[in-house]
Image (tube, grey):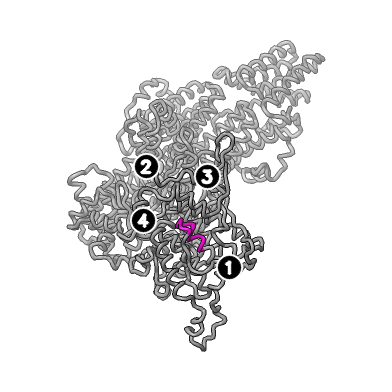
Amino acid sequence: DSSLWDDELFNSHLDLDDDGEMQSKPLPLKEWIEVSKQKIMFNDKKIATGKVSEEHIRSALFVALKLTECFIKAEKDANPIPLSSITAENVFVQSKALHIEDVWITGHMGGSSDTGGVLPRLFALGIVFSQLLSGDETLAFGGDVNKCDEFFDLPSMNSIDLSKSNGDQRKKNFRDPGYRDNHSRCISKLEFLLPHSLCALVKNLLGCSEGDFRSDDAFTSFKDVQMDLQLMLDDPSRFLDDIPTSPIPSLTICNKLYGREIEKEMVEDSYRKLACGTCIGIIVSGRAGVGKSKLAMHVRELTCKANGIFFDAKYEQNNYVKPLTAIGSVFNSLCDWLAQNSDPPQLISVCEALDGALGGQASLLAAVVPNLLKLMPSHSSLESSNSCIDVAMSLSFLFAELLRVISSLSKSISLLLDDIQWADSASLLLIQNLLSSIEGSKSVFFTLCYRDDEVADDIPFNNWLNTIAECSIAKIKLQNMNHGAVNNLVSDMLHLSPRITSPLSSALHLKTRGNPLFLRQLIESLRDQGHIYVNLRKRRWAWDQNEIMDMKIPDDAVDLLISEMHRLPADLQLSLKISSCMGSSVKYSVIEIISRDMAMDFKGLLRQISDRGFLEICVSSFRWIHDKVQQAAEELMPEQERLELHMRLGLSICSQILEHDPDNNELFFLAINQINRGGAGVISDPRKRLTIAALNLKAGRRAVAFSDFPAALKLFEHGVSFLPSDSWATDYDMSVNLYDAAAETACITNNKNAVAFYSDQLITHAKCLDDKRNCLYIATKALFQANRLHDSMQSAFEVLQLFGEEIPQPMGSDKVNNEIRVMNEILRNTSDESILNAKETKNKKIVTLLKLYAELANIMRFIEPSLMGPVSLRMICLSLKHGLTSASPIGFALYGGVRAAMGNEHLTEACRLGRIALKLLENSNFSTHKSLVICAVYFSVLWMSDPIQSIAEAHLLGHRAGMQSGDVMWSMFNEQAAYQTNYVAGMDLSTVRVQLRSFVLKGQNFRSVTGRNIAILWYLQAVVLQDGKHRLNEECVDGIPGLREVDGAGKSETMFLLIKQNLHVQRAFFFRQFDDMTFETNNTSDVISEKKHPLRPALVMAIFFEGLVSFQLARKTSNETKKKWIGKGVSTLEKMRCWTNHCRWNCENKMLLLDAERMYLSGELEQAEKLYAMSIRSAHDHKFIHEEAVASEIAGDFFYEKMVPQKSLAFFKHSIECYKKWGALEVA
């Protein structure tokens, strides 16, 4: 209604500049109230009720806050505002339109300068506030406010004479009834106009007039007033608005962190560091219920602000079947998100990247992360992979690769894993590898939470914590909340100022020790029991402080929850018990089954439980609000009742699933989980126990089909536990199947103790060799996995004899030589196509024999390399005669190496066998040992036909294949071979140095100590060529053991000594220090021939440098000594000439340089000059920068001796340039 607006009055208080813009103008408070009344004080709804508008209240609260700050500043400056000045007439408001800019109070002309005490001034401020907030400047509380100090003529507590009547003491000082009536009328008017919280604020100011006898809620300082006003402005719905009284509201905790300012800043600082790649996550520890998850969820807020994506999962205490469920669900959600937010071209890119990253093991990962198929739409389904060597290591690598691919194509990612103290060992290993893989990442942030009070005696978990401490992850430890934090929480819950709730908070803090979960449950319990209630007259929460203080409270949250649950009706208690048995949640899919079995409305009862705050309703389930609540529900039952309930639920669900939906794997596994949690002790009937054992066997085989081997092992173990005690006599076939399956999956998951137990039991009780065949192989393999190499070899020999096989004899024996001649003839007459198209054998004995020989080949590599030839020979024989298996490519690969070591006339056939082995890997059924085959073929065979640079690339592919299949040993052999080959190929030494150092550091647990020590030798060689020979004398070189340490460790290893000598010869040439050369009687060629070592690129390089040094020494000697050195050089030249015929790319430049040296020493200088030039050109064309440098240097020597200084200088300069490009700065 326009009649309510007095524009003339409003505009009279506005100043306009020359452009008509409004300018701010100070107004006395009463005038500002009048303007506010005209413009915003009464909106349509408030007009009908006469209430003050929300707009005016907000503005008035801001004025009140500013005015209070004036008082606080004055007191801080030791210049309190005089009591006589505290009136509405002395308050001024600076505003522009209705925007408040400033508020101040002026002195009263001629007034008293007496400041009075704090309480009189608070009372005077209350009168001002009553007029300001209500908009009624006529409100008066009696008397002259300028003489309001008369109201405080009450005795202090100290002045009361307790021997006299209090009534007599106070009677003469009490205000007259007229004042009290007027005071009540004004308060009643305020209660009509304002929300109850504002009325209470004014009353608590006016109550200061009571002095020492004021109420507990009365103010004592201006700081308290400021705090209450600020709360009302910041959170009006909680601290300003009236709480509803019909129905009575529930108590809710505000969604914020209490008392965690320091920890919150640590989280934010860690997340900021992600952008710099200096922090990859946080790990939060603390007791149960202390608020770890709440703090961790702050990462979600930070991630959302950064426009990233956040996923979380929680480990369960009793996850009996699926070890990787938690982390699998996180990655499942991540895959689903990427699939939903990618267009078709992006999905094609993702699919291509994942194909390369996961290789043939994608199905293994898809068993744990089903939504992986959404990112690989070209693979509508992935066949189960049986080509895994070590499942745990394979999955660790595959998860890391999946995260790498997704993080490179998406927004920043934050992953939360809660309650990791309950994670299984496979999950912990996986998390550890994930953290290592993202070190330095700027796009992936991990948050881990665990209960430190539950892992104090958990040695494996604490060792794991020490391991991940090496990662860039911040540690945050949470303690219980202090009193201030508790008070802020209680204040928010009760919608009251912290100064009012402080006494209650003290009592609650004392009883709960500040544990947030315990505190929450206690407050809700007190509310349910009526100790915390809504005061309908005051329209606020209230409590009985004395009763709460006197109450006996349980010692922890679980006991309190149990006592609460015991007060529930019987049907709700039963529903709680059932829900606790189902785990962290009750899925909707089982609710109907349970309802029928229990003859109850289970879903309706769960809703009632949710209303009471024990469960929360999710999209597909009812979930416990905290695992301690689930624990309390479990403890409602004695152990036997709990076990029987598990069994009943499992059998009920299983019977329904097998009858109506047998392909429902989710519910089938859930049912078996419930049965197994009930345990064999619940069932006494042998027939039922056998049935359950069969169900576990079926479930385990399903898990194997999904490549979930850890889960399969648990199921097989449960199946064994249900077998009757005399099962070997009464249920032999079932016993064989379960024990054999358990032993095999234990071997796949590298569970040594389980392998030993189940294989021993089966071997002991099996009635025939065929039944124990698989376990005999598994026992041998387990010994190798345990690094018991000689025991493993002896076991393999014994098993071979059991199968009627002969123990392999060493190379060189008449029997072996004859078998080799026969096999060479067979292979010569057998085409590649007939081998590649041979059928796969189904003969279990042959399959086991070939697996056993493959294992034996692994063993022989470490302890008796001379037996690798006969072993590989037998593998080819069995494969050609009976059919191929997954181990057959190993036989062809290793035998190719044997043929290569037999002499130059065998090189062509060796390369043929190597390529056959690689072609066989293209069949997924034969790709299990891909990493081993690649290493053997390229390391010992195909370097004779393929460019050496491509050999290094092939080894890196073998490294990746090994990581994908969990074949860590051969993966590391490939990686080591790749880096050594990079050196041989002349890659930049700085790069090689970094590669080798990284390999040595991460290879501390490498099965081959000799392999690691050899890698250190190559690393030290790169260091010396860059920094100088003095570094060989250091105990530790950039964190890597020095030469003295590795020399002592490897002095008995033939290959170590050979590589050490080879690198020493190289250094002698590079630095022209030949004084201690003694290799003429122990050269590389002789050692290879004697020890039957296969030839490899590093050894070819060694032979080359031995030839160069031989010719250099021939220059420095004469007579017979010179002839000896020339003979050694010529012998090397002839080998290099032969190898050049097979691989011109790798050997031509070496052969030309050696030939040039021979010509020089024989006096054919013109021919030598041509050969030097040809060697330099060949090295350049074939990208051997280091050998181009060597040839240029020797050519410079040649022309220097011929007295052609210009050519000599040109070649020396070119040599220096090449050495620098290679990175050999010290040589340059």
Identify the amino acid type marked 2. Val
Mark 2 and mark 1: Cα distance apart in space: 69 Å
Mark 2 vs 4: CB contact within 8 A: no
Q: Is residue 573 magenta?
A: no
What number is the disc on residue 368? 2
For disc 1, the marked residue is 118
**Residue at 51% across / 22% down in the picture?**
907
Residue toward you, 824 or 394? 394
**Residue at 64% across / 19% down in the picture?**
1179
Furthest-top residue in this view = 1166
Picture layout, residue 695 above or below residue 512: above
User: What x and y, as percent, mark residue 878?
Assistant: 37, 32
Q: Which residues are magenta?
A: 126-137
Q: Residues within 10 Å of mark 4 (few under 14, many from 20)?
A: some
- Sequence-first tag of 2 and 3: 3
Mark 2 and mark 3: Cα distance apart in space: 75 Å
Secondary structure under badge 2?
helix
**Residue at 51% across / 33% down in the picture?**
812
**Residue at 42% across / 30% down in the picture?**
350
- Look at the image and tell me whether residue 620 can be seen: yes
Looking at the rendering, in which quadrant would you find the N terminus?
A: top left
For disc 3, the marked residue is 12
For disc 4, the marked residue is 625
User: What x and y, as percent, mark residue 505?
Assistant: 46, 66
